[in-house]
Image: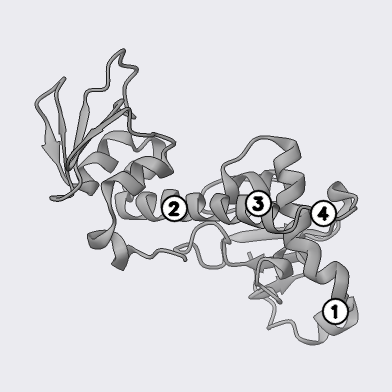
Amino acid sequence: MRYTKNDIPRMLITAFLDALGEKPVKAFEDMKLYYAPHRDDTEPMLAVDTKANRWYDHATDESGNLKDLAELTARGDHCKDISGYIVKMMNENEIAKEMLSKRAMEPEVIHLDIGKIPLTDFMKALGQEHPVAADGDLRIYNSPYDSSAKGTMVINIQTNLWRDTKSGANGGIYDLAYELTGCANKSELNRYIAGEMGYYQRHGLSSEAEEKSQLPKKMRL
């Protein structure tokens, strides 16, 4: 599933901690103990009441709900939009789980020259069949890893590189796959990209001519 900001009141703190890479160290009845994700503690000091969906920090005597915890863990631009940060982390975790699940269900690796895959083809595999706008060699898309970012991803079809005008993230296909999964292991990224491209390898991609015929009106950047 994909989360939106409307889902935040129903999100579990334990699920958010899982998205941050934190696993419970101890558990008893409705309580789970974690290492605080925003500190380098030697003991698990963060207690989560799974029934009340609240947390308590034994080191600082602070307590709160999911948003309060997110405020402690957010860094950089994420501090400006805590709800967006929560949704981003949760969705990235879901995508990573899907990647691992797909790997288990379809262990055969598709043989592709990953670095040469056109980013526009990869966007099709991610569900964006066509850009929202175009200008010369530039193709503009909604960000596939940030549901709140509309029309912020720009792909240069000549260089096969992308740039996010909102976050500043940029690079090639591996950099985009990293933003989607949070995984930095190249082997795993190869599997993820190959898995997403599988349908198009089997069924064929639409032609460049067809794509151009369906492009929206040009947008100046």
Alpha carbon distance from label 1 to label 3: 24 Å
Q: Estimate the x, y position of residue 111 in percent, counting from the top left.
A: 90, 53
Q: Estimate the x, y position of residue 20 in percent, counting from the top left.
A: 41, 39
Q: Residue tagged by mark 1?
A: 206
Looking at marks 1 and 2 on the same chain, the residue that comes earlier in the sequence is marked by 2
The answer to whether the residues at label 3 and label 4 have Cβ atoms under 8 Å apart is no
Badge number at residue 163: 3
* Rendered image quadrant of residue 126: bottom right
The answer to whether the residues at label 1 and label 2 have Cβ atoms under 8 Å apart is no
State which mark lies toward you, 2 or 3: 2
* Rendered image quadrant of residue 178: top right
Badge number at residue 108: 4
Alpha carbon distance from label 2 to label 4: 29 Å
State which mark lies toward you, 1 or 4: 4
Looking at marks 2 and 4 on the same chain, the residue that comes earlier in the sequence is marked by 2
Choose between 9 and 100: the one closer to the eye: 100
Q: Is residue 161 left or right of residue 48?
A: right
Alpha carbon distance from label 1 to label 2: 30 Å
Alpha carbon distance from label 3 to label 4: 31 Å
What crowding class fits label 1: few (fewer than 14 Cα within 10 Å), some (14-19), or many (20 or more)?
Answer: few
The disc labelled 2 sits on which kind of residue? Lys
Secondary element type, mark 3 = strand
The disc labelled 3 sits on which kind of residue? Arg
**Extreme residue in the top direction:** 42
Looking at marks 1 and 3 on the same chain, the residue that comes earlier in the sequence is marked by 3
How is the rendered protein coloured?
one colour
What crowding class fits label 2: few (fewer than 14 Cα within 10 Å), some (14-19), or many (20 or more)?
Answer: many
The disc labelled 4 sits on which kind of residue? Glu
Badge number at residue 88: 2
